[in-house]
Amino acid sequence: MTKKADFNAEEWSTLVEAPLLAGMLVVTAGRGGTIRESMAMGKVYATARQQQGESELLDDLVSSPPTMDPKRVGSTGDVKGVAEQRLREAIEILERKATTEELETYKSFVATLAEAVAGAHKEGGFLGVGGTQISEDERRALDEIATTLRSPADPS
């Protein structure tokens, strides 16, 4: 079983930030709903905490409040680029150090988090009537995240 102690501080930071950045990519893809979307992220972490014991790596990941270095995105303003880069780095780290099952559990956690964010706020409509649960922009962000999660860490 892989756990937090198997990673150096920089690697662990990457593993912790990547899911949050994936969520931020979806948040910034649509307009409005930031509070609901943030709450949806929190619920995914809470649900993962309740499933303690299924993956020691995921247990360690969700055992403390999620954090992210705001300078990472603030310096470039490119949430999409930073999120995709961090996700690729996280997958590469896990491919080297974790089991295949742990890697898949991590990918599933990231995908679940992104889907929860996308579904947290109805897009369009008027006074809650009409609209769509997931906007086209959010769907594109989800597709980009899925593609990044499926891609080999080293495309060469």
Image: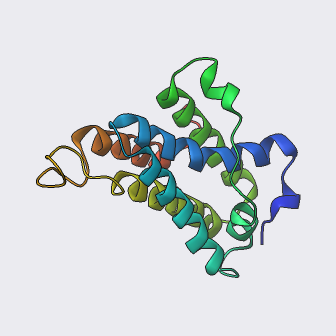
> Vertical placement of 70 versus 103: above or below?
above
Q: Is residue 47 visible?
A: yes
Quadrant assignment for the N terminus: bottom right
Along the horizontal axis of the image, is 112 left or right of 70? left
**Residue 31: x percent and y percent?**
32, 36
The residue positioned farthest toward the top in the image shown = 76
Along the horizontal axis of the image, is 14 left or right of 119? right
Along the horizontal axis of the image, is 138 left or right of 106? left
Q: Nearer the viewer, residue 2 or 135?
A: 135
Q: Quadrant of residue 49?
A: bottom right
The residue positioned farthest toward the front in the image shown = 127
Q: Is residue 92 visible?
A: no
Q: How is the image coloured?
A: rainbow
Q: Residue at x 71, y 70 (%)?
A: 59
**Residue 117: x percent and y percent?**
42, 53
**Residue 26: x percent and y percent?**
41, 42
Q: Residue at x 76, y 65 (%)?
A: 60
Quadrant assignment for the C terminus: top right
Q: Nearer the viewer, residue 25 or 3?
A: 25
The residue positioned farthest toward the left in the image shown = 130
Along the horizontal axis of the image, is 30 left or right of 133? right
Q: Residue at x 69, y 64 (%)?
A: 62
